Amino acid sequence: MQNHNKETVYSLVQVKGTWKRRAGQNVKQDTKGRVSASKIYESSSSNGTTWTVVAPITFTYTVTQTKNLLDPSNDTLLFGHIRDAQQLESIRSSTNPIKRFIVMDEVVYNLYGSQVTDYLEARNVLYEILPLPTTEENKCMEMVLKILEEVHRFGIDRRTEPIIAIGGGVCLDIVGLAASLYRRRTPYIRVPTTLLSYIDASVGAKTGVNFANCKNKLGTYIAPVAAFLDRSFIQTIPRRHISNGLAEMLKMALMKHRGLFELLETQGEFLLNSKFQSAMEPEEDLIDPASVSTRVAIETMLEELAPNLWEDELDRLVDFGHLISPELEMKVLPALLHGEAVNIDMAYMVYVACEMGLITESEKFRIICCMLGLELPVWHQDCTFALVQKSLCCRLQHSGGLLRMPLPTGLGKAEIFNDINEDTLFRAHEKWCSELKTGSPQLNLTTSTTCLF
């Protein structure tokens, strides 16, 4: 029997709290109801009836660079996520106490816990602070459940009392996942305290924990209602963790912004020494290396994330450095920090790009030299070709059967490639190991950003 399909499109209109279907693709807004952006498509055949729902999801979140976030006179931490002026005025004029549940990395708590407490008490906030050891080794569902148990005991309003996460990227990921699960989505705020989380974890929508010895195997896409960025936190982290964050900044430079690459190339040592603390006046932010580099890194990151927040599109330049590094990072945990593993991945991919003729030898050496100037590792003995093969095999399984490998095609520009043969990858790996392996005489690289080849 031949099937005869007939499809009708319905718009949805709400009148006095009730949604009703109304036939037609373009139903105009009128005084009697509110028209939804969603549509229901109904089709019938001899096999039955099918309803297809198309429901656009929009999400608004704020990324704010601020100073003196923990100064009681600065109300960003409490109200910076509220965009509606009427709602803000209503909250400020209310006699009800403000409630906040805060999760802090325990190292950050030891450094800033008293300041956070003083801030909350000065603002008469009803609060609870939960310090936790949010390390990569502890990034698991057990930690998520511990947070949820404490949130449930404390009690929060699922719409008006966001959970606040203060810490590095692991802390922000764990708290984000917990918030996304509690009552199916509770708002949360990210306050990054490391350079890596400042320019990476804080500005996107990913949450997650490790599972089955795989990095971020469990997670969701739920952006925070806001991320509040204060560079002053960075001054208390070790120098190695500054380098760790510079790897993600360099990623964006190599993929999208030659000017940022040249800034890191020439000012990398200054940024490391100054720990991104500006000595310039506020009006000089446009020339201050710390201000310029963080702003450009965030802007380029948001350019790539905003149109693809839920990763519906699998071709992503921000995956540069993230094809092999997850496998390497988990294999040697905790020997490598996240950014260090990413940089080792990027260094190898730079050799792949050169082997393919996408960049010149001089560009390759210039990039490696910049990496060393940022005090980042460019090679690791556990990044074997077998590990490369395993990682790329996993990539194919989770990327729709395509490699989707981002590679530089110059300084500050890149493209996605799928047709890379194994011989090319092997030759690049051989050359990478030969030139960058510890003690190798083939390449006399120094940690100076002025090294020449």
Image: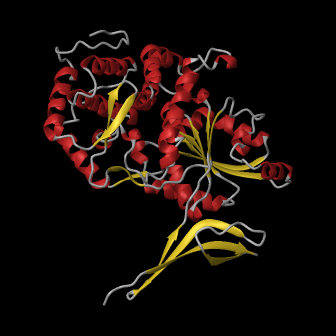
Q: Is residue 88 visible?
A: yes
Figure label count: 0
Q: Quick one: quadrant of the C terminus?
A: top left
Q: Which residue is drawn at 75% across and 68% down?
A: 30
Q: Residue at x 69, y 50 (%)?
A: 100
Give residue 138's position: percent from left, percent from top. Answer: 42, 47
Give residue 260's position: percent from left, percent from top. Answer: 47, 23
In the depicted structure, whether residue 69 falls above or below residue 152:
above
In the depicted structure, whether residue 323 falls above or below residue 399:
above
Q: Is residue 428 left or right of residue 253?
A: left
Q: Can residue 336 be seen in this view?
A: no
Give residue 267's position: percent from left, percent from top. Answer: 47, 15
The structure's colour scheme is: secondary structure
Q: Residue at x 55, y 65 (%)?
A: 55
In the depicted structure, whether residue 55 falls above or below residue 390:
below
Q: Is residue 408 left or right of residue 229?
A: left
| Figure quadrant of residue 114 | top right
Relative to the observer, which residue lies in front, 59 or 275? 59
| Figure quadrant of residue 80 | top right
Q: Is residue 254 left or right of residue 276?
A: left
